[in-house]
Image (tube, grey):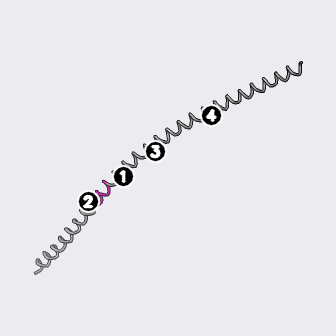
Amino acid sequence: MELSEISSSQSVTLEKQKEQLMESDRQLQQAEEKYSLLSVQMRSLEQEMLEQQNSLENARIYFEEFAREEQLKRDKLKREKTAAWIIAGVLLCACIAK
């Protein structure tokens, strides 16, 4: 009788452990699926980040080139303005001298 109760108790425990094992397996499979999905998303985001970094680098290069060109234009205008003032001064002196 006592052996029968022990055997029955062990059977119940075994069934519970089987259910727990099945639940653990199910949770493990869900975790693996989530991991796989997150890995794909991570690779996609890494690729997108690299593309954005390249775009930003290109924008920085274009901006620096634009800034250089604008500085050259400003320098040229400044030289032209200075030359015009010099010419105006020389002409004024020439007019005064006559």
Magenta highlight on residue 35? yes
Number of labels in the image equals 4
Secondary-structure class at tag 1: helix
Mark 2 or 4, which is nearer the eye? 4
User: Marks 3 and 4, Cα distance to the nearest angstrom?
Assistant: 26 Å
Towards the viewer: 32 or 7: 32
x, y (%) of residue 67?
Answer: 60, 35
Residue 29: image tag: 2
Which residue has dot 3 on it? 52
User: Marks 1 and 2, Cα distance to the nearest angstrom?
Assistant: 18 Å
Q: Amino acid at mark 1?
A: Gln
Which residue has dot 1 on it? 41
* Stretch of the chain drawn in magenta: 29-36
Which residue has dot 4 on it? 70
User: Marks 2 and 3, Cα distance to the nearest angstrom?
Assistant: 34 Å
Mark 2 or 3, which is nearer the eye? 3
For marks 1 and 2 on the same chain, the one whose residue lies earlier in the sequence: 2
The 10 Å Cα crowd at callout 2, few under 14, some 14 to 19, many 20 or more, is few
Mark 3 or 4, which is nearer the eye? 4
Secondary-structure class at tag 3: helix
Q: Amino acid at mark 2?
A: Gln
Q: As drawn, is 30 to the left or to the right of 60?
A: left
User: Marks 2 and 4, Cα distance to the nearest angstrom?
Assistant: 61 Å
Secondary-structure class at tag 4: helix
